[in-house]
Image (cartoon, rainbow, N blue to C red):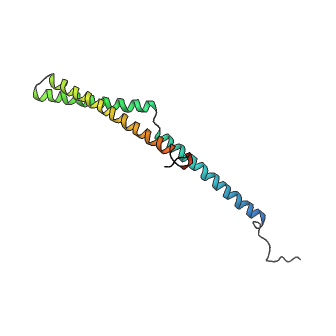
């Protein structure tokens, strides 16, 4: 009859345990790197706007301004009996407002683009102070 002692080594002791710890640490580091890369890629995609998106935005802003101008002109003509002058005047204001909205949106887009370019080109990693 064999008697086993209570001082047996556990199956996870020794070199296998260290190897497993190293593999876990390496896997966690690789996962963190993948998540950081994905976060950077998502941030780049959020900040970039496609040409179709810009056209849709500018067109919608211009169209909405003209539409509101026409509606206000029709309401003015209806209540004050100034047909067609209310419509023509408010159509002119709607066109002007639409043009100003597109100019404002374009300037905002250009300012955002310059800010991104500045953020990416300045800094010690690129040899400049920033």
The quadrant where residue 13 appears: bottom right
Q: Nearer the viewer, residue 43 or 6?
A: 43
- In the displayed structure image, the side of residue 101 where residue 75 appears, left or right: left
Tell me if 13 is positioned left or right of 77 in this view.
right
Left or right, 121 with reference to 88: right
Identify which residue is drawn at 71% across, 59% down: 22
Residue at 79% x, 71% y is 9
- Depth check: 67 or 93 in front? 93
Image x and y of residue 30, in percent: 64, 52
Residue 61 position in % (x across, y down): 32, 32
Report the residue that reaches farthest toward the top. 84
* Residue projecting furthest to the right: 1
Residue 17's place in the image compared with 66, above or below, is below
- Residue 26, given in percent of the width and then of the height, sits at 68, 55
Give the answer, above or below, for where 124 lies relative to 114: below
Q: Residue pushed farthest front?
A: 128
Residue 10 location, x and y as percent? Answer: 76, 69
């Amino acid at each position: 009859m064999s008697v086993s002692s209570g001082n047996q080594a556990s199956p996870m002791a020794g070199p296998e345990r260290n190897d497993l710890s190293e593999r876990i640490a390496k896997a966690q580091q690789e996962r963190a790197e993948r998540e950081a890369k994905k976060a950077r890629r998502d941030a780049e995609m959020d900040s970039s706007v496609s040409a179709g998106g810009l056209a849709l935005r500018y067109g919608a802003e211009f169209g909405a301004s003209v539409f509101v101008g026409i509606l206000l002109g029709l309401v003015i003509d209806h209540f004050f009996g100034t047909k067609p002058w209310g419509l023509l005047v408010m159509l002119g204001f709607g066109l002007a407002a639409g043009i100003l909205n597109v100019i404002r949106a374009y300037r905002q887009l250009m300012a955002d683009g310059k800010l991104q370019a500045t953020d990416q080109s300045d800094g010690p990693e690129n040899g400049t102070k920033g």
